[in-house]
Amino acid sequence: MSLERVTARTADGPMTVHVAVPDARDKRAAVVVVQEAFGVNAHVKDVCARFAAEGYVALAPEIFHRQGDGVEVPYTDVPRAMQELGRLSNATLERDLSAALDVARARDDVDRDRVGLVGFCVGGFAAFLGACRLDPAATVAFYGGGIVRPRPNMALEPLLPEVANIRAPILCLFGAEDQGIPPADVEAIRAGLDTLDVAHEVIVYPGAPHAFFNELRQAYRPEAAAAAWHRTVRWLRTHVA
């Protein structure tokens, strides 16, 4: 595996994209990996490396690029993370994801028809947005908050009214003990997806809080994380290949 930093052009300026590339350089599938509220940090880069080990070109765009290059927020500084989230909008996320998908599809080692989208936390919201507004081959959204109802002090707007626009398979993963995403919201997402004529699943992991997949946070739950990773890889193998 090798690591790269490339630049995507957006309407709001350049955006760094971190890329993990498998050793084999034949054309292959790719996945755009969207960060949590803490930036493209060690955890996100490790997730990209794990996807590369599975044979995918993995690309993580810095969606905080409007505040500078390489913006990372310590896990202990939640107020700053909320401040960064407050600067995001549905429109800026759409532009950034579109640019990242374009970067993936322009690569010589990527089959442009096989580019998926995976996101965590605000990245889960972003992945769901990408499924509604863009054209990933398939999507996996980990514990995306704000999909059903507005979140205080944030410009991000609920996405459930756009669910009918989803045209590709989507997998949504949640923790049963997530204090920011109540069960009623999960069920509303499930009901919305059930109206679609596309492959979809909504999985809830018992005993798992928000961010249960992140091994660097106290919320980490190894069993749920392992099960979610297995399901994610299987979803991509089935729908992106």
Image (cartoon, grey):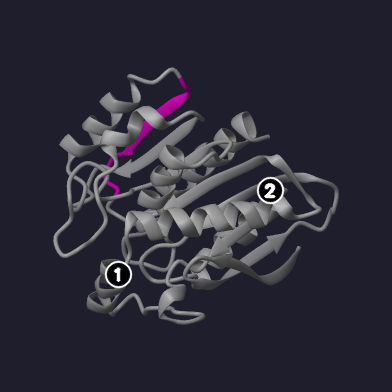
As drawn, 10 above or below 172: below
For residue 187, side relative to residue 47 (left or right): left
For residue 28, side relative to residue 123 (left or right): right
Tag 2: residue type? Answer: Glu
Q: Please tell me which residue is depicted at 39% across the width and 38% down the height of the picture.
A: 172
Q: Position of residue 174 (x, y in %)?
A: 32, 43
Q: Residues within 10 Å of mark 2 (few under 14, many from 20)?
A: few
For residue 191, side relative to residue 35 (left or right): left
Residue range of the region highlighted in magenta in the rendering: 198-208
Quadrant of residue 82 within the rendered picture: bottom left
| Residue 223 is at least partly visible in this image | no
Quadrant of residue 58 within the rendered picture: bottom right
Q: Which mark is residue 6?
A: none
Q: Which mark is residue 87?
A: 1
Could you tell me which secondary element the residue under label 1 belongs to? Answer: loop
Q: Position of residue 193 (x, y in %)?
A: 34, 26
Q: Quadrant of the N terminus?
A: bottom right
> Label 2: which residue?
54
Magenta region includes residue 200: yes
